Image: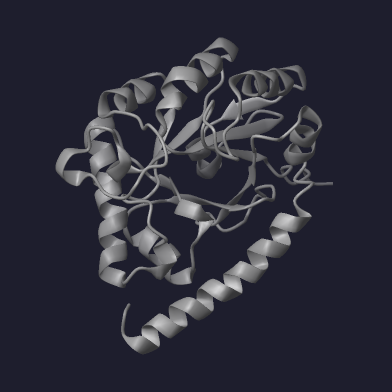
Amino acid sequence: MGDAPPAPVPILMYHSIGGSDRLAVRPEAFAEQLAYLRDTGRTPITFGELAEGGPAPVRPVVITFDDGYADFHERALPLLDRFGFRATVFVTTGWIRDAGPYAAGRPLGRTLSWSQVAEIASCGIEVGGHGHSHAELDQLRDAVLRTELLRSRRLLEDRVGRAVTTMAYPYGYSSERVRRAVRAAGYDAACAVANALAADGGDRLAVPRVTVRAGTSIAGFERALCGCGFLVDHALTKGYAVVRRSRYAVRRLRGTV
């Protein structure tokens, strides 16, 4: 008999550690979740390492953070360092605190500075793209979409001094057209949301993640690692995908995209 196929990998999606919105996880809860990963034999790797498809530990998990909030540097990074865990941070470049003339969009909280982004990268944390202005990529005109993707990647590469080949879609929204643009912009892999586990052989430009929220208990965290407990999310996601495709089609007919 041949070798069994690799087990699906949970990719955890965080936003803020210590903020006040519904996706912000308390530092104490985050520490408890990291301890659970350690105690159950999970080994965190970066999203880039997973996407490369090389040899992986027995029970891999990927810890990701979206947007680039300042509390990653203040609260999450020390905890990750304490446990010796790696992670991936998807940064919205126009939201950077000292973005200067490149400032774009409206961050929902305090964000990282460029020096902190560079420090994070030097600590072994993968830095990936998350768009430049945190726009809904599937609603952008082609030219604007290309600029949104390329500007983010080039700014990050200039600041961290290494290739940036992974990204996550703002709000999780993408489409076939967006994924083609992502590939053309030089990204090799991209995270969606989907609230499912990442299976070997899936679309590298639409890799699913599972959401960790403010109210996620340790029992809920355990279910998330199995890809369970997201029935309502799945129903809402499918329904909203239809709405978004229709919205884009109407805008094209009107000539606004």
Q: Quadrant of the rendered structure where residue 53 is?
A: top right
Q: Can residue 251 be seen in this view?
A: yes
Relative to 137, 226 lies left or right: right
Numbered disc total = 0
In the image, farthest residue toward the right: 1
Q: Is residue 169 visible?
A: no
Q: Work out whether residue 196 or residue 73 is closer to the camera in this orientation and state it.
A: 73
Q: Position of residue 126 (x, y in %)?
A: 43, 31
Q: Position of residue 215 (x, y in %)?
A: 70, 35
Tell me which colouring the rendered structure shows.
Answer: one colour
User: Is the C terminus in the top left, top right, bottom left or bottom right quadrant?
Assistant: bottom left
Q: Work out whether residue 145 or residue 213 is closer to the camera in this orientation and state it.
A: 213
240 shown above or below 103:
below
In the image, what residue occupies the spot 62% across and 40% down?
11
Relative to 200, 124 lies left or right: left
Relative to 136, 20 lies left or right: right
In the image, farthest residue toward the left: 101
Q: Position of residue 119 (x, y in %)?
A: 33, 20
240 shown above or below 169:
below
In the image, farthest residue toward the top: 82
Q: Where is residue 252 in the image (x, y as percent from the top left)?
A: 38, 83
Q: Work out whether residue 15 or residue 87 is closer to the camera in this orientation and state it.
A: 15
In the image, what residue occupies the spot 52% across and 37% down?
15
In the image, farthest residue toward the bottom: 253
In the image, what residue occupies the spot 56% across and 20% down?
85
In the image, what residue occupies the spot 58% across and 39% down?
23
